[in-house]
Amino acid sequence: MRVIASYSMKGGVGKTATSVNLAYWAAKSGSKTLLIDLDPQGASSYYFRVRPSTKKWAKRFFKAYENLVTHIKASDFENLDVIPAHLSFRNFDSLLAGFKKRKNRLRRVLKGFDKEYDLVILDCPPSISHLSESIFIASDVLLVPVIPTTLSERTFEQLMIFFKENDYPQNKIVPFFSMVQNQKSLHKETMRAMSARYKIFLKTTIPYSSDIEKMGIHKAPVDVFAKSKQANHAYRQLWEEVSKIE
Amino acid sequence: MPDFGGSFGKVIVKAKLQKLIGLRAILPVATLRLLETDFSLRDSDQKIVVKGHLTQSMGGDQPTCYCTLRALRGYSKFHTRAAQILEPLIKAKIKDFGLKCLLEAQDLEVFKSKQGNSVLLLTVAMQAEPAVRSIALAMLDQAERHVRGVIADTDTEFLHQFRVNVRKLRSLISLLKKALPTTLIDTLKPKLSLIAGKTNKLRDLDVLILAHESYRTMLPANFESGLNKLYGLIEKQRKQEKNKVARYLSSKDYKATIASCAAEFSLNSVFETAMASKSIARVVKKLILKRYHKMLAMCQGISCQSPDQNIHALRIEFKKLRYLIEFFVDLLPKKRIVKIVGEIKKIQTILGDYNDYGVQIGILNGYVDDALVDMSNSLSGLIAILHQKKIEKRSKVESAIADFFTENMTNEFNLVFGIRKTKGLG
Ligand SMILES: Nc1ncnc2c1ncn2[C@@H]1O[C@H](COP(=O)(O)OP(=O)(O)OP(=O)(O)O)[C@@H](O)[C@H]1O
Ligand SMILES: [Mg+2]
């Protein structure tokens, strides 16, 4: 079982759009996939029309895998299940602060899914916190959407430094360009510079596209309502590239 | 041209089935017209909460509708509710719904004949003559079941199985001749050997046709035209021979022969011989043990210089031994027999392969014709290669014999088939 986190400390960069479409293509290509929505806003749950349970259960989340299992919901798509977020997930950080060995918590509870799933995708909230650190440890791949702007470049650099200073393996970090507008010279220039500097960016880029925005209207992955559009091909290609990462 | 492997529309299906069915052809037994529809039930968020499948079977006077509901994880309440709503509309609940159940609903012959098949029940206490008679009848029936396929030339296995069953029947009455009245043996033996003989040539031709591909790969490309000529000839002969066999098997003559055999076996036992009234289990065990010891003696004489006839004779003995065990397997201790038969099968395969080379060489030799130079060249090439392969197999034969006839095996035979002496007097 692989764990892929869609992560960035910046908000609104396309983490959720990535989680949703990647989970969709992974499942469609035959991987038994579980999407866990860790963001209390519950955006990826919303895109799959999955409602959270009425009970607050954040407290039990990190206790045992068995607690998570009861919250699994089948999506409309074969091979794809979802654990929806609950508003109480906003307390994850203070909860984790109270645990010993908190960094390993997430990894430990996810281990339980090993038998049933080939892939777990984590849709992460934008922050750098206790939760983020347990995500860094729990995941095999940290997929980071980067909008090619100066500010994003700085944020990405901060992440790399954070990993180095805290001895997290930098090779887990797999960035790709998101919301790319090729007609903007700033985007093109930033992409060129960052690709040259880091050499770890994926080949696939996700264009800025109104079809992706429309996911909110359709409450579905792009493939369902914009099959032949460029944005859809981009996500499919993204999955193909990510699935080949060793 | 017979169908050497079955025809089926779709290539992939064909390839997959072929692996399972080997040489057998695919025969249609039923036609089903199905209308399949997936559907889903959604909640107020338009989220799918139950998935379902509708199958309409168009066979018969009116379509039958089958509905399958699938619960989705986290939404089982909706599934329960949907099932409740459907409840008053359904006639019956079906467990393990699938193609099999759809076929069963069609009242097909295939499913009926299996139940109608009278099961042969042998018991240890049964007397030898009636037991042999009932097995013989069953075997005759088995042979007869393949006749239609031989005449229709559905696949080569029909003839093969027909011959196997006739051979088994002949072995049975010869192995247990002392349990049957001599008149029966005297009348039936020539009849059955006649039937078997009528199909020899066709089987030889089938063997050649089945070997075509492997022969082609054995020879270099420049022998191909000679080989093609040979196969042109073989196929022509097979066509003629097949018609001949089909005519024979459809003839009054053949039908009368089979009917008279069946009538003869169906007669009440007369217990003319001493063996006839003995317990079949005792009789068979004794025969098996005797045969084993005879074979043990035979194999002592086999060395690397022994002529093929000796090996051939041993191969035949193994066949008889195996038949004896298998005819009466219900009367023998299962676990130990499975092991023994496993060992017998192993050595039979090796002896059989060795013998096959000889047989093929013999048949091919018959085609050598000085007037047809390139065909005869190809034949000589094949014969040389088969001869070489045969020589290579020879050492395997000897080691198989050594592996089979061990002290352990002899002990095992003595133990399983030895008749325990009654205690007391000794
Ligand atoms: N490639 C894109 N082109 C155009 N719009 C996009 C694209 N990707 C995402 N969006 C839109 O941008 C907004 C933010 O995207 P998304 O929710 O995926 O980002 P996020 O990183 O998960 O945000 P947050 O940090 O709030 O969780 C959404 O309205 C989404 O529809
Ligand atoms: Mg998000």
Image: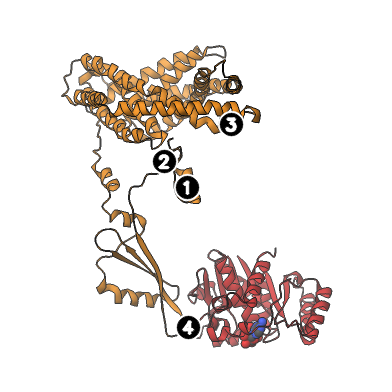
Chain colours: A red, B orange
Image mark 1: chain: B
Residue for badge 1 = B14
Image mark 3: chain: B
- What is the spatial separation of the Cα atoms under label 3 and label 2, in whole angstroms? 23 Å
**In this image, B173 relative to B371: left or right?**
left
Q: Does ligand 2 reach within 8 Å of label 4's beta carbon?
A: no
- Find numbered disc 4 in the image and state the secondary structure of the residue it sits on: loop
- Find numbered disc 1 in the image and state the secondary structure of the residue it sits on: helix
- What is the spatial separation of the Cα atoms under label 1 and label 3, in whole angstroms? 23 Å
Picture quarter containing residue A204?
A: bottom right
Residue for badge 4 = A53
- Residue visible at 44% across and 77% down? B48
Q: Amino acid at mark 2?
A: Ala
- Residue visible at 68% across and 70% down? A141
**In this image, B426 relative to B76: left or right?**
left
- What is the spatial separation of the Cα atoms under label 4 and label 3, in whole angstroms? 69 Å
Picture quarter containing residue A108?
A: bottom right
Q: Nearer the viewer, residue B424 or B247?
A: B247
- Residue visible at 34% across and 76% down? B82
Q: Which mark is on residue B216?
A: 3
Image mark 2: chain: B
